[in-house]
Image (cartoon, rainbow, N blue to C red):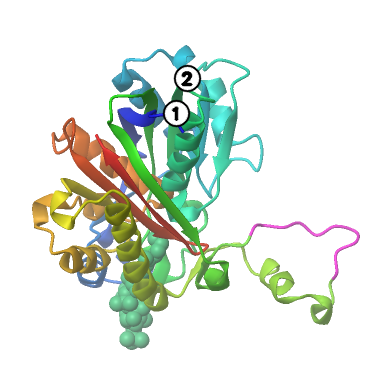
């Protein structure tokens, strides 16, 4: 393999305009601002009312391309992490390609890995770049979970928000860029967090419950998100810590070498548990969950964009991104910025 690395040269993000506070949710389900704030760290989230997934993804992507200094026609691959697309097909990536006037003929694909979607998309993009199949790649994380949560289930609907984030990667050979990617899945625990598709009946559908296997009966459940939060919590802390250690070990780094840890924003208590295990000071971990809640695949690119724009990441810094989500999936990406 050559010495080419994927360098992040531009970031962008887009949140829907409608802001919903914990107080607003008190009118929707039997909850309190106090419970949500103390158990999750969330105060507000943005909910798409008129925006589509392609709308917010395109705005985030446009901002990232502008920040990169490249022209739209320079992009030669689009990869999007999402599990709440506007369409089963065309892919979100193809629709963003069209919306932004990117070159026709370039490959464009979506990756399904729930809250780990952006890191999986970065991993795919990085491999295209290092194999010299692409030079400039647009990577997007977008999810509108307001579409899939059960708005009568207080244990889940208060947790999620909508949004999109994006990054532009460029092939460079100066030593900076993505140092490592470590992606994982354990499908045995898929039932801890899932959202069935809204599958239509057809003339040959099997209606007899006894004939359906396990998965068959899940397919007939309402197509809303189900989560066993308590069980997920413990696995999330363990898996993300493991992925951070993989990122550090594979690059000969120690926790004190991290300039900024950008974790998936699911719960401040999960983030605090990771921080404590690594013994990181507050300034070395980025937290914005209070404003946006859990935006699934969008959470890391939104956080990355904010961290960069706030001046918390500079050339040469070591940034580690770590995610966990449905699948179960998890992973880390280490970057020398
Ligand atoms: O991003 C993908 C990965 N997802 C995650 O990583 C999520 C991980 N899990 C979590 O963040 C937490 O488990 C939750 C925030 C989902 C839940 O927090 P918890 O401290 O584990 O609460 P719990 O599920 O054990 O529920 C405690 C109590 C229950 O009442 P009882 O049985 O003790 O009387 C719930 O019914 O809190 C109740 N409860 C609520 N009360 C007010 C659950 N949701 C609410 C609510 N408002 N919204």
Contact between labelled residues 2 and 1, with CB atoms less than 8 Å apart: yes
Depth check: 230 or 146 in front? 230
Residue 134 lies in the magenta stretch: no
Q: Where is 147 relative to 126, above or below?
A: below
Query: Mark 2 highlights which residue?
Result: 75
Q: How far across and down, in percent of the image, does residue 329 sit?
A: 47, 60
Quadrant the C terminus occupies: top left
Q: Quadrant of ligand 1?
A: bottom left
In the displayed structure, 192 sits above or below 67; it is below
Whichever of callouts 1 and 2 sits on the residue coming sooner in the sequence is: 2
Does any portion of residue 30 appear in the rendered image? no
Query: Residue at point 34% right, 58% down?
Result: 246
Res. 323 image quadrant: bottom left
Which residue is under mark 1?
138
Percent x, y for residue 211?
Answer: 84, 78
Name the one closer to the observer, 317 or 304: 317
* Residue drawn 10% across the image and 56% down it: 282
Magenta segment: 197-206
| Badge 1: residue crowd in 10 Å (few <14, some 14–19, many ≥20) | many
Left of 312 or right of it: where is 184?
right
Q: Is mark 2 within 8 Å of ligand 1?
A: no
């Amino acid at each position: 393999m050559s010495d080419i690395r994927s360098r992040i040269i531009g970031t962008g993000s887009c949140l829907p305009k409608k802001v919903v506070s914990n107080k607003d949710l008190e009118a929707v389900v039997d909850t309190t601002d106090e419970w949500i704030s103390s158990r999750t760290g969330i105060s507000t989230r943005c909910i798409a009312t008129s925006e589509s997934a392609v709308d917010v993804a395109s705005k985030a992507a446009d901002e990232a391309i502008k920040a990169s200094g490249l022209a739209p026609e320079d992009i030669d691959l689009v990869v999007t992490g999402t599990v709440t697309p506007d369409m089963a097909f065309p892919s979100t990536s193809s629709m963003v390609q069209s919306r932004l006037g990117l070159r026709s003929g370039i490959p464009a694909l979506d990756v399904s890995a729930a809250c780990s979607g952006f890191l999986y998309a970065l991993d795919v993009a990085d491999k295209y770049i290092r194999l010299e199949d692409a030079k400039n790649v647009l990577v997007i994380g977008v999810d509108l979970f307001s579409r899939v949560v059960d708005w009568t289930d207080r244990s889940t609907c208060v947790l999620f928000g909508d949004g999109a984030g994006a990054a532009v990667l460029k092939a460079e050979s100066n030593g900076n860029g993505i140092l490592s990617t470590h992606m994982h899945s354990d499908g045995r625990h898929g039932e801890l967090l899932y959202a069935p598709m809204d599958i239509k009946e057809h003339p040959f559908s099997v209606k007899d419950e006894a004939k359906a296997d396990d998965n068959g009966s899940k397919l007939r459940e309402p197509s809303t998100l189900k989560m066993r939060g308590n069980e997920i919590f413990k696995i999330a802390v363990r898996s993300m810590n493991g992925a951070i250690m993989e990122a550090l070990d594979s690059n000969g780094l120690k926790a004190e070498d991290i300039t900024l840890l950008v974790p998936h924003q699911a719960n401040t208590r999960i983030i605090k548990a990771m921080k404590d295990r690594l013994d990181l000071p507050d300034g070395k971990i980025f937290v914005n969950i209070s404003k946006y809640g859990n935006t699934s695949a969008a959470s890391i690119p939104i956080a990355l964009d904010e961290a960069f724009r706030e001046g918390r990441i500079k050339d040469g810094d070591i940034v580690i991104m770590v995610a966990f989500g449905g699948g179960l999936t998890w992973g880390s990406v280490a970057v020398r910025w």
